[in-house]
Image (cartoon, helix red, strand yellow):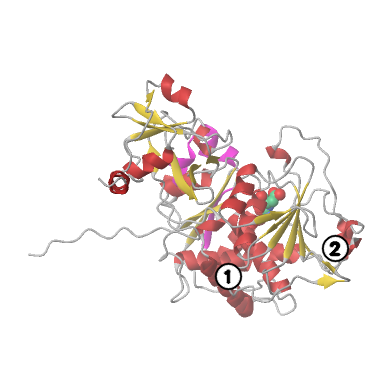
Amino acid sequence: MTTARPAKKPIIRHVVSINDLTNKEIEQIFEVAQAYLDELADKSLPYRIGCGTTLGAKSILATLFYEPSTRTRLSFESAMLRLGGENITSADPNTSSAAKGESLADSVRVISNYADIIVIRHPKDGAARLAADYSTVPVINGGDGSHEHPTQTLCDLFTLKTKKKTLRNLSVAIAGDLKGSRTVHSFVYALARFGAHIAPRPAPGMDLPAHVDKRLREEFRCTIDPNGPFGALYCTPDEPHQPTLFAEPEFKIVGGKPTIGAVYVTRFQKERWSNKDQTYPTVDAEFLKQPEFSHASVLHPLPRVGELDVSVDSDSRAIYFQQAAYGVPIRMALISLLLGLRKGKSLHRFEGGFEGARVPPYDQPGNEGLQCSNPNCIVHDPSERPYVRNKFQLIKLSSPPRQKLRCAYCETDVEDFVIASKKNKWFTPDMASFLRINGENFRDFLAFSSASEAENAGFHLRKHFAPQPGLQRAKARARGG
Ligand code: NCD
């Protein structure tokens, strides 16, 4: 008699961060988006999908939006309808069970039985990752707090690729609220990955968040050149294995001076700032007269609320409405690949993403020990508290060698912490020795944000770790023992 084997649990592919996708997968999404444009675009407007297919017939997309949206929700819904599928939507938390206090985790557990794929937008950083943890179908992040907005980045890159042919060595100025804008955060990682240079032009006090800036430099191999032709400029080193998608160099020299290839304008994200009366620069026809912008395509994720003057609309460099139109073919492509609607093409076979599988080695239940320091992280939301875990990824940096922890939800880093043994009641700030002895098994250990926190929780400082046995032997040999 043969025993039935348990069904293999399928890998569910979620897109929460742009880094959940490899460069190759981004290329694949663009190929499929281009195929939809070739097959289904309006003859007179090549960037507008004008008819549909039946590839996605009987598939259901749920749009679960806890924050206002025009482009993201409607282009996702349009994409699903063009694929021949159906949409169910919760566009306003005041009219769903969220108004009765239902947690996001429970809502997603329920909705993943009603739909084949879910797009979520939420005001809290990390909410989409929490949703993914509780979903049995793919979750796409439609924007979570000021964390990320990966599908906007897919639209941005696709627009740039179509217009500029290449991203490699292209200098992209990013203007406005670089701190609060989630579109910018996904975008800068992607720019760095494809070999573009980033020229930040923040509004006063609205620079990139420190953890994004550090991550660009420490993990995406960007260097900052303060004397670069555009002021502070992040340059990505030349790497022979850079993907070929954006192959030809675009760095133009005009009259001996390099020019900016694109300027990406963002609005002041007032909803994420307590001081709403801050000065905010405007990009207008006058601004674009500066010689460095003579060849700059102008992008904006939209909506604009005054920071991008309407006088720019008639300028041939303005491509933001085209960028918004690409939301449909890009999202058609993403849905198709996540649901495997096109023969032989799917994303759900791959595990991990650009940075490999994201398995948090530190994963503890309850309220004990280290908590994420970001006050807007979903882990601090009282309704989600019973559903979240204290989960952190271990990030190992090489120069200088050190380790840090990254919140598995909102990706804010913890640079300083101590690690304690529950069994032995000691703690140490010496993470390197800890890892050497325990490997990356954090199961019996608790992290604390400081020594005093660990002491208050009843742990004592372990002064010295026993030296490595191999090291002891080597030292003995060196002494002639
Ligand atoms: C962006 C968003 O919601 O983050 N909008 C969009 O999806 N196109 C940008 C913004 O609101 O400023």
**In this view, which residue lies farthest toward the front?**
480
Q: Which residues are magenta?
A: 86-108
| Residue appearing at x 32%, y 45% in the figure | 475
| Numbered label attached to residue 242 | 1
| Residue appearing at x 59%, y 43% in the figure | 66
| Residue appearing at x 42%, y 25% in the figure | 454
User: Within the magenta stretch, is there residue 228?
Assistant: no
Q: Residues within 10 Å of mark 1 (few under 14, many from 20)?
A: some
Disc 1 residue type (three-letter): Gln
Is 429 rendered above or below residue 71?
Answer: above
Query: Between residues 473 and 461, which one lies in front from this camera angle?
Result: 473
Is 68 rendered above or below residue 320?
Answer: above
| Residue 11 falls in image quadrant | bottom left
Query: Between residues 50 and 461, which one lies in front from this camera angle?
Result: 461
| Residue 284 falls in image quadrant | bottom right
| Residue appearing at x 45%, y 46% in the figure | 393
The answer, for residue 25, to whether it is visible in the render is yes
* Alpha carbon separation for disc pair 1 and 2: 26 Å
User: Within the magenta stretch, is there residue 92?
Assistant: yes
- Left or right of 295, for residue 75: left
| Residue 96 falls in image quadrant | top right
Q: Name the residue carrying label 2.
A: 292
Query: Between residues 188 and 346, which one lies in front from this camera angle?
Result: 188
| Numbered label attached to residue 372 | none
On the image, the x and y values in percent for residue 238 come to 63, 67
Label 1 secondary element: loop
**In this view, which residue lies farthest toward the left?**
1
